[in-house]
Amino acid sequence: MYKKGFTSQHNEILETDLPVQGKIPKWLNGNLFRNGPGKFEYPGQKLVHWFDGPAMINRFSFKNGKMSYQNRFVRTEIFKKSFAEQKMSAVEFGTDPRPMWKKLTPPKMSDNVNVNFLKINDDLLTITGGMSTFRIDPDNLETKEQYDFGDNMGSDLQMTGHTPHPSLDTNTGDVFNIGNNMMKNEYIFYKISKGARKREVIARVKTKQLSDIHSFSTTENYMIYIEIPWFLNKSKLIMGGSYLGALEWKPEKGTNFIFVHKKTGVVQTVHMDKAIHFGHTANAFEKDGKVIIDMPFFNRSNINDMKVDYVLEHGQTTKGYDSFSRFTIDLETEHISIEKISDRFIELETIYYKKYNEKEYQYVYGPSQLDDSQFFDRLIKIDVVNKTEKEWYEVDTFPSETIFVPKPDATSEDDGVLLTVFLDGKSKRSFMHIMDAQSFTELARIYLPQHIPFGFHGQFYQL
Ligand SMILES: [Fe+2]
């Protein structure tokens, strides 16, 4: 039943009067933007990986107890060309549509932007792991121009990619991110100061072989890139094939925690023999002179399991999943300890980000599943202090990432609601699910007239 989430959605709609089951809190006023692939194939051509489809933006607007919905593809140059020709015309993360003879030349990378959003000043931007960044009109979801950061960091000589998970310093309002340069084998740690657009380089760190960059952590003083042993074989990339096909899992290399001081740019690398693979870190902070990073992790690389054909045949697997754990790093002794918080599978996990990112915190939320589930089929809330969990489950419904929105007068960390898009496997439509985050019970659901393909990340902006 989850398979509907891996089928294309070509309808672009604006629905303003959607029936509400239950009650949307009157205080909930704002827009939830969600990003993800809208399409999985062209005539005679299937996209290989979940990460490959052209970006479709979904906006859920909440006002006075009501919700409206709009969705729209992002009109990138590649999207326009591919739609006009009805075939893929650039290399995506896992799909290289070029004939063999053409694969001997460096590929034209896609300008697809299907992962996340970033707001810089009043500009809403769609972002991805590549350098492409489009500005979107938040009112009608029209695609505007490629965003101009007002610097030269977009040139291939400077940076060839960066994470689609910039990190907000909740004290200063500065935004931090990590990029890489494939030609120079270096990671680039940079920031965008509050109110600015320009990316300022804090440090460049050389490495023997680049690892994939998808997310990273920040604390009050540090940016921390976790270099997992999933390395990019550049000759494979140059000789043809997708980015995914050029990544090699080398567990014997262990894991490097690369710390860069936000202010001084001083670099310290702490090595761990254990090889881990992860998608996202939940949170990180400093305590008693140590750095703490919480995250779910695998003992193997699982990204090939997210190829569309594989997921449709076998479901989403938890094989090799270890746990949601706390990594405590002592920068004096360079000792790393790992303490299990929960055995439960969790991915795309989120926190009350705007207040607790980089701070000691208590709650993590996210989609989960059991080892024999076929896909995410429940939401969980992990209490990282007491090491307990709560769960919300309804048969044949499949959640995506959930976003916490605090009450305006919130008195505790979980005093607010969780907004989640679920796919209803029976009706083959998606619905917006609103939960009370504290009691972990449903407050309302609003069915859409159609389904939304399984997406990745979203951001809520208060009105
Ligand atoms: Fe992500």
Image: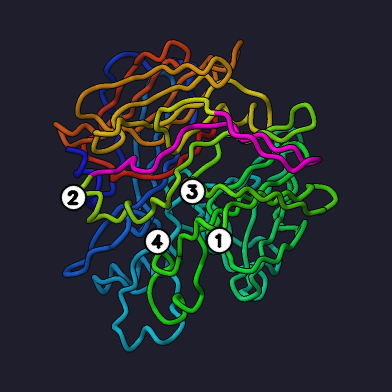
Which stretch did the figure color magenta?
Answer: 315-339
Q: Which residue is mark 1?
A: 211
**Alpha carbon of mark 1 to alpha carbon of mark 4: how far?**
30 Å
The structure residue drawn at horizontal position 33% and vertical position 52%, both measured from the top left corner, is 306
Task: Give the label on residue 313, or none.
Answer: 2
Q: Which class describes the residues within 10 Å of circle 4: few (<14), some (14-19), or many (20+)?
A: many
Residue 20 appears in which quarter of the rendering? top left
Mark 4: amino acid: Arg
Give the camera-side residue of 64 and 285.
285
**Alpha carbon of mark 3 to alpha carbon of mark 2: how far?**
23 Å
- Residues tagged 3 and 2 counted as in contact (Cβ below 8 A): no
Left of 252 or right of it: where is 35? left
The structure residue drawn at horizontal position 43% and vertical position 78%, both measured from the top left corner, is 107
**Alpha carbon of mark 3 to alpha carbon of mark 4: how far?**
33 Å
Q: Which residue is mark 3?
A: 277
Q: Which residue is mark 4?
A: 75
Q: x and y percent of residue 335 in the render?
A: 71, 40
Which of marks 2 and 3 precedes in the sequence? Answer: 3
